[in-house]
Image: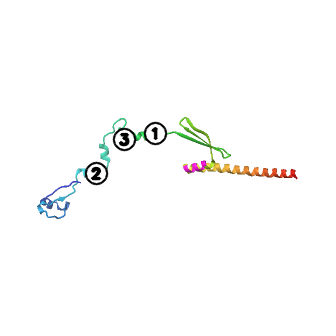
Amino acid sequence: MTVDVLTHDEETAEAPATTEAPATDVPAAEATTVTESASPAASEDSAPAEPAAEEAPKPKRGRPKGAAAASTAKKTRTVELILTVTGTADGEWQAELKNGSKWVAKGLEIPAAAVSRAAKELHSDLSGPIDEVINQAREAQAAKVAALEAELEKAKQALAELDA
């Protein structure tokens, strides 16, 4: 947008394209108007960005200097940690943690409830299969407890018969 100053004589010739300033105590010959002219810069702003892309300078070869180089370096650094969680049919869980090629922890016992909570926190696709394994182990342990209680009851009866 550009601002042009016109005198009263020029203003009357271009009356439809101008917006008059508010009336003041200034004589009519010294009155000014503000017009918006369609300059080449204004038309380039409203045009699509395709021509500007063609005129853009080609990037220089090599590593970028300044802040861009520092931010890309931080984005490319990764840490490789491998967490392995192993469960048995009896419901015993163990964890191992490896940092690169070095073992950080090995053979740590973990409660099944903690494994289930961690899986739910990570992702629902992980928690479903892990909960199924935990439920199967729970059912197996419940069956084992029932069998042991029945055996204990038989042993108590045999002891009572021997005492009689």
**Percent position of residue 55, x then y:** 29, 43
Q: Quadrant of the N terminus?
A: bottom left
Q: Secondary structure at mark 3?
A: helix
Q: Which residue is mark 3?
A: 67
Mark 3 vs mark 2: in front: 3
Residue 45: assigned label? 2
Q: Amino acid at mark 2?
A: Asp
- Decide: few, some or many residues near mark 2? Use Cα within 10 Å; few <14, some 14-19, many ≥20: few
Q: Amino acid at mark 1?
A: Arg
Q: Which residue is mark 1?
A: 77
The stretch in magenta equals: 114-121
Disc 3 and disc 2 in contact, CB within 8 angstroms: no
Among the two numbered marks 3 and 2 on one chain, the one whose residue lies closer to the N terminus: 2
- Decide: few, some or many residues near mark 1? Use Cα within 10 Å; few <14, some 14-19, many ≥20: few
> In the shown orientation, is residue 52 left or right of residue 35?
right
Among the two numbered marks 3 and 1 on one chain, the one whose residue lies closer to the N terminus: 3
Q: Secondary structure at mark 1?
A: loop
Q: Amino acid at mark 3?
A: Ala
